[in-house]
Amino acid sequence: MDIVDTALAPFALRSSQPAVEPIVVALEGTPWDSELDLSKLLKLGEYIESIAPKYRDFLDTTRMAVIDTSVLKHQIPGGMISNMVSQLRQQKALHRIDEVYAELPQTRRDLGYPPLVTPTSQIVGVQAVLNVLFGRYKMVSKETQDYVYGLYGRPPVGISDEIKKLVLKGYKRGKEPITCRPADLIGPEMEKAKEETKDLAKNICDTLIYALFPQTGTQFLKWKYGVEPMPEKVKPKTLEDVKREDEAIAKAKIEAQKKNA
């Protein structure tokens, strides 16, 4: 082993990498001494610790352990886990994450075992969440339909006719997946994107955001330029927000203790 991926302690473990600090200390004076300055790592950790509470809503808080041993079984990449946690929390269904872990291998099998790397990992993850929340393939994401239709290429393993029928029901492009090269079906997109965003995009970056993500990109640009107000629930959390939350929680605990006294 030549390389170990690590993270600074505040962002380590769970779905992340192991903490760098104990590894640096454990290897000091050995042939594998990293020669990293521990005091500087600790200083960086202190800074990150001061801003980390802004991101605590992205943590899976359904278990006490900070080491996710279940990954040895479900083998879901960390990036997928953080997105699924976010999805489930928005639906107030984070308590069902173990059901999603159990569903994900089946969804991946249904879709022909796509590799769990972006973008197909997110397609599988989102569809697994939808299957748990609403019933298997009762609700299908557009990206899943695009994938099954063949716009992301041919899956490693064939997809059953039953799954194709379920996923492509009502799909605007048709019910039969393509067998040709996906890019052969794509017309010139840039001029079309420029025309469709002429009243919203201010530069080429805005146009590219729309071209890549038509729905979410349009919404983002409307928020960016004040066409629509950004909902409170999607605004980034500040340290002041965290402080108010903690004060409210502390107050609630005191009130509860008084009632139970």
Image (cartoon, rainbow, N blue to C red):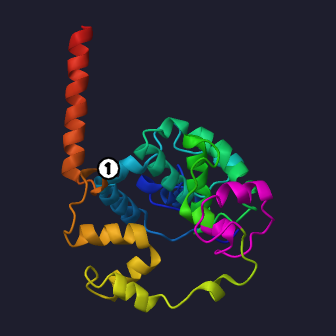
Q: Position of residue 69 (x, y in %)?
A: 63, 44
Q: Quadrant of residue 246?
A: top left
For image coordinates 29% across by 50% down, the residue present is 233
Q: Nearer the viewer, residue 137 or 52?
A: 137
**Principal SS element in the magenta part?**
loop
Q: Position of residue 187 (x, y in %)?
A: 55, 89
- On the rendered structure, is 254 left or right of 85? left
Q: Quadrant of the N terminus?
A: bottom right
Q: Secondary structure at mark 1?
A: helix
Q: Dot 1 corresponds to which residue?
A: 53
Q: Position of residue 8 (x, y in %)?
A: 44, 59
Q: Amino acid at mark 1?
A: Pro
For image coordinates 76% across by 62% down, the residue present is 112
Label 1: how many Cα within 10 Å (few below 14, some 14–19, many 20+)? some
Q: Position of residue 179 (x, y in %)?
A: 76, 78
Q: Quadrant of residue 144?
A: bottom right
For image coordinates 66% across by 82% down, the residue present is 182
- On the rendered structure, is 53 left or right of 9? left
Q: Is residue 58 visible?
A: yes
What span is in magenta? Answer: 146-175
For image coordinates 61% across by 69% down, the residue present is 146
Q: Is residue 118 visible?
A: no
Asked whether residue 26 is drawn in magenta, I would say: no
Q: Nearer the viewer, residue 228 or 242?
A: 228
